[in-house]
Amino acid sequence: MPLSQRDTTLPTPCDVLVVGGGPAGSTISALLAEKGWNVHVLEKDRHPRFHIGESLLPHSLPMLQRLGVLGDVEKIGITKYGAEVVSPYHGRSRTLYFSKALDGSQPFAYQVKRAEFDKILFNNAVSKGAHLHEEVKAKKVEFRPGSTHLVQAEDRVGQPLAWEAKFVVDASGRDTFLSGQLGGKHRNPHHNCAAIFGHFEGVKRLPGMDEGNISIVWFDHGWWWIIPFKDGTTSVGAVCWPSYISRRKGSLEQFLQDTIALCPPVAERMAQASLIGQAYAAANYSYRRETMRGDCYLMIGDAFAFIDPVFSSGVHLALNSATLGADVVDASLRGAPEYEACVKEFERSVRLGVKTYSWFIYHFTQPAFRALFMSTGSIFKMEEAVLSILAGDAFGRSPTRVPILLFKIAYYLVYLFNFRENWTAYRRRITGVTHTVTDVTDYAVNQRS
């Protein structure tokens, strides 16, 4: 029965209630609907909607293939064969190609506009039989052990709605719906950044097959991304330290332009560029929960943890946790004996992925890290192992453990050899990190009151 024709004062029964219709929510909904479960999804906005995080990883492609959407993603994406890293401190750049990773089976990925990409995943969930409700915001879950959970929500005009669900999945992204109700979300005490970004036209592109590659540029206040799109436009943004963001005066658009001027390699690429629409910001980047599951509920994607996007890991971690999470929910609803094995693999994989990327992210802007990344040649397959991580092989399924350990040892040795320079850089990065960046409106959380 259409929503407008039923009594909205009575809860709608379902097997699974998913909060959030982004990549994680749409993925787990599609997979569970395929298995025959009655799945309802509450999405606070309406697709297509703007979102950041446009650079996919090669090891995401098999998951998109499993969902049946890889062909559609290919149509909207520009091929990305690797990543260009630019160091003004070394006066040069390097391009790292995914094909040279330890596991070269996934040599490319795509850059996509998230509004288009997310809508593809969202529509795919609908086509598989999931019931999606846009502009409906989840407000509270009444957990009832041994029975169904009651999920209270409201539509865009404030009309109360409710669902009775056997299982609840929090895929609300940085809204962290269940963490807001249950508590337990901890901001990373050593990493508190903010990003300023926008979409531009007229940005200079890399030549030949490198046209679709992401460019990552270091500068004194953090790092930049430059992500080209198929239609000729480009996503450009800077992730900056709190000490720099706190200096902002005037409009966000002007602050973004002023920040571009501080980084010559970016300014050169954008000499003829113009901003399309508005500039955006996202604050207080990194957080994590201690737990990701409970009595018939699960947290996936950014609802569990969020880390700095330097290695474009956000969508990849969301797809992985949703894919494994679907097996957990299915086993739970069936009362299957493999439930405990599914849960253990889910937690192992999700935690390892976050931990793996976190180490690289929190050391990425250190001079010691730049020195290793900009050096040519590879010993003990360290470079190939790092490329595997950059390609999305971050869950311990390939022989990267020993080479990555050697890379970390090399990093700490280089750090000690240039201790003063690295310690100064570290102190600059964490200045003000214990304070919330309050002067940046986070588009991802505050699009709707």
Image (cartoon, grey):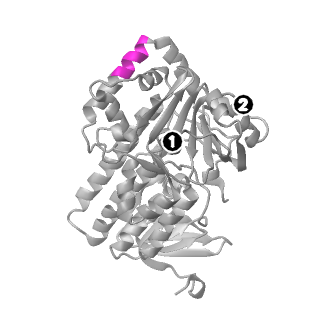
Picture coordinates of residue 393 (x, y %)? 34, 44
Front residue (pair 3, 308): 308
Left or right of 277? Residue 294 is: left
Mark 2 surroundings within 10 Å by alpha-carbon count, few (fewer than 14), some (14 through 19), many (20 or more): few
Main secondary structure found in the magenta portion: helix
Q: Secondary structure at mark 1?
A: helix
Residue highlighted by disc 1? 208
> Looking at the image, can residue 144 be seen?
no
Q: Position of residue 184 (x, y in %)?
A: 47, 48
Residue 233 as seen in the image, left or right of residue 396 = right
Whether residue 162 is in magenta: the answer is: no
* Amino acid at dot 1: Gly
Q: Which residues are magenta?
A: 410-417
Q: Which residue is mark 2?
A: 247
- Corner quadrant of residue 39: bottom left
Q: In this view of the protein, which residue sits in the foreground, 7 or 18?
A: 18
**Residue plotted at (25% across, 62% down):** 339
